[in-house]
Image (tube, rainbow, N blue to C red):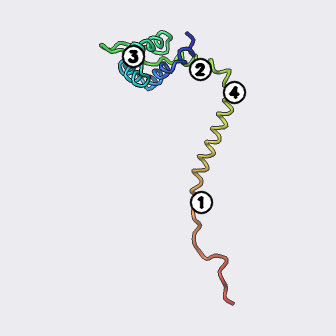
Amino acid sequence: MHALDVLGDPVRRRLLELLADGERSAGDLGETVQREFGISQPAVSQHLRVLRESGFATVRPEGTRRLYAVDPAPLEAADGWFDPFRRMWQPKLDALGTELARGRRARRLAPAESSPEPEGPSDDTDKEN
């Protein structure tokens, strides 16, 4: 199965998102995904099996629990597939980054520039003749 076929399913993407924070038990993953997607425990198990068989996830037994973790290698391969397309969006993302940095700098400098001027005699005072 092609990496994008695996990642194309929202349940499998969510499972990988949950695993991105670290190893999780099958039961914990199942509870979260069942609640969010309204699917059965056997359906969650099928999605975990696809992730395992396609190499996106590893599993290890710990007593009666099965602990899942992300295997980054297939994600890196999927990322490589996007390389030819990056030239289309990378300049726009770079420009966005520049504008965000300018905005942060302007906000940081704004309080210093808008501080009130010290009060003192003005040049417009009436002079007695």
Residue tagged 1: 114
Amino acid type shown at disc 2: Asp
Identified at 46% across, 12% down, the residue is 52
Q: Is mark 4 on a helix, strand or loop?
A: helix
| Foreground: disc 4 or disc 3 | 3
Distance from the alpha carbon under mark 1 to that under mark 3: 59 Å
Q: Which of marks 2 and 3 is nearer the N terminus?
A: 3
Distance from the alpha carbon under mark 1 to that under mark 4: 40 Å
Residue tagged 2: 79
Q: Earlier in the sequence, mark 1 or mark 3?
A: 3
Distance from the alpha carbon under mark 4 to that under mark 3: 40 Å
Amino acid type shown at disc 4: Met
**Which quadrant does the C terminus fall into?**
bottom right
**Percent of width and height locating residue 41:** 38, 15
**Which quadrant does the N terminus fall into?**
top right
| Foreground: disc 2 or disc 4 | 4
Residue tagged 4: 88
| Foreground: disc 2 or disc 3 | 3
Amino acid type shown at disc 3: Ser
Residue tagged 3: 40
